[in-house]
Amino acid sequence: MLPGMIPNEAELTAGVKIEAGRQYGFFTDTTLCIGCKACEVACKEWNSLPADHLTLTGMSYDNTGALSSNTWRHVAFIEKVRSDGADGAMVLPPFQSHWKMMSDVCKHCDNAPCQEACPTGALFRTEFDTVVVQQDICNGCGYCVPACPFGVIDLNELDGKAHKCTLCYDRLKSGLEPACAKSCPTDSIQFGELSDLHRRARARVQSLHEQGAGDAYLYGAPGGPGATGNLGHLHAFFLLTEQPEVYNLPSAPSRGADRVLPSLLAGLATAVLLTGAAFGFLLAV
Amino acid sequence: MDTTTVSSRDGIPTYHERPAIKSSLYGWTVALYIFVGGLAAGLQIVVTAAELVAAPDSATAVLIGRGIALAGAVLGGVLLILDLHTKQRFYNMLRIFRPTSPMSIGTYALMGFGFWSLVAFCTQLFGLPLVGLICGCLAAATGWWMTTYTAALLSATATPLWAVAPKLLAVRFAASAMSTGAATATLIALGAAPALVLAFGDLAALALLIELIASIGATVIRRRRGVNGPLQDATWGPAYIVGVLMFGLCAPLVLYALANFYAGPAQAMAIAASVCVLAGGLLMRGVILLAGNDSAKRPRDYFRFAAGAT
């Protein structure tokens, strides 16, 4: 038995020392995902999250369905079929068994719309450059929920607070790799310092291209799809082999806060104009 | 090899037809708040203008208007707290000011509007007309924000129906706040200041006209971007087209116009028009909110919106 916690355990499990003031994130390589859902289970166990629903969705092996207030990792299952409806199992190349799997998670956006929408400051940016809801401050106004361009953050109507992935804030503080990344048996989910992850991801794309998987690309890396509309880069970014919508991701998400000023100016101009008209009509009496 | 994924029809693939974003949890409580807050602000602006130009026989109407505006601000605050999912922490709204969040901007707009409306009403009631007027002006100025921030709040979300035309949604909300405020002022004036009925009616009509033009413009944008579905489908289409556009905008426009030309039944027409404006203003907020929640459930609407956003 260990005498206690291993100091800086992430150095052993992910090759990274976790220090305040640096940027951390996830690189999720969907070509390595085998759909085992170990990330979903590890996340639920570590964060004491209850089961969401115990029914079958009836659409695929995905009975989790979506990210929610109780589900912070969600493995998507996308089946490749022949577009003419013919039986693909006999004729399609066996790459990834005709299944695309992708473990989705909060993107921890650089300009996070949920945080920018939060009126209480419950949503804040941590010393690891991640985005976390402070449960003792959230008053359940629910504005972050429609603000998220990825449909991640969700309100739990039982406790009346917003919840989402914390990128295992408590584990990071103790030098531990986040639970999902640590549990991932294929290293589809990699945790690390963002600049290092970007480097590794670009090398992986190049290697895949060389192996003949020419459709591999990064979603959410600086300057690429997903890191659009002033969101900045995504701290959880992905290697995909289909267009983003296939994985339920928007091709060019945008930052809602950029719409505030034009909207306010147009509305104020209208109200001021009509106030002027009120003076006009009343003076004519 | 010609391959596709299971749910790739209509050119845009989806993930098993499931929503790509989450709908807001806002419903009729919030719709009622947007309506009441806008009306209170519009009314405060209109009666302050009447007081500033010293419109004939306006003193009683101004006092009643300020009273209703104050009641609206209080009711608005209550509605917003009722809509929180952890109501006992409502005061956390005042922990910070966040200029990127229209919810935060609105918190202070409502606080300021309520405060100045309270002081303006009380000072006027207890015979300090000059102080009342100054506070009324401050209430009206914060009222400008009240008429419009709710549109910015909806537009700053990822919901396609709300976010696709941020400026026009704000024009519509601000114009509706002014038209419902002017319609309420018309009803007050019918009893307390008959000389001002037509002036308030004309203001409401102008606001309706602006709202109608902005609504048509917004429809064009929504259709071009492929996100108009929820406002033309069976659930909200009839309520939007018949209720909001016909009954709430076109009908009162005609009635106010008629009231200008026919001296006899002018009163009845002004009452009917005002009732249409008020009902239409509430319905517009409700339909936009609930149809917006539906639009967030349509992955293709969101993907079309998000693809065209940059």
Image (cartoon, coloured by chain):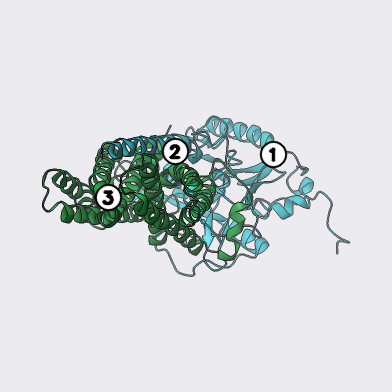
Chain colours: A cyan, B green
Q: Nearer the viewer, residue A178 or B61?
A: B61
Q: Which mark is residue A264?
A: 2
Dot 3 amino acid type: Leu
Q: Chain of mark 3?
A: B
Q: Nearer the viewer, mark 3 or mark 2?
A: 2
Residue identifier under label 1:
A23
Secondary structure under badge 3? helix
Q: Which residue is mark 3?
A: B231
Instruction: Name the element at disc 2.
Output: helix
Question: Which amino acid type is shown beneath numbered disc 2?
Answer: Leu
Residues under numbered marks 3 and 1 in contact, where contact means CB atoms less than 8 Å apart: no
Q: Chain of mark 2?
A: A
Number of numbered labels in the structure image: 3
- Spatial separation of the CA atoms under disc 3 and disc 2: 24 Å
Asked if both marks, 3 and 1, belong to the same chain, the answer given is no
Indicate the position of residue B127 as horizontal and vertical percent values: 48, 54
Look at the picture and state if A4 lies above or below B49: below
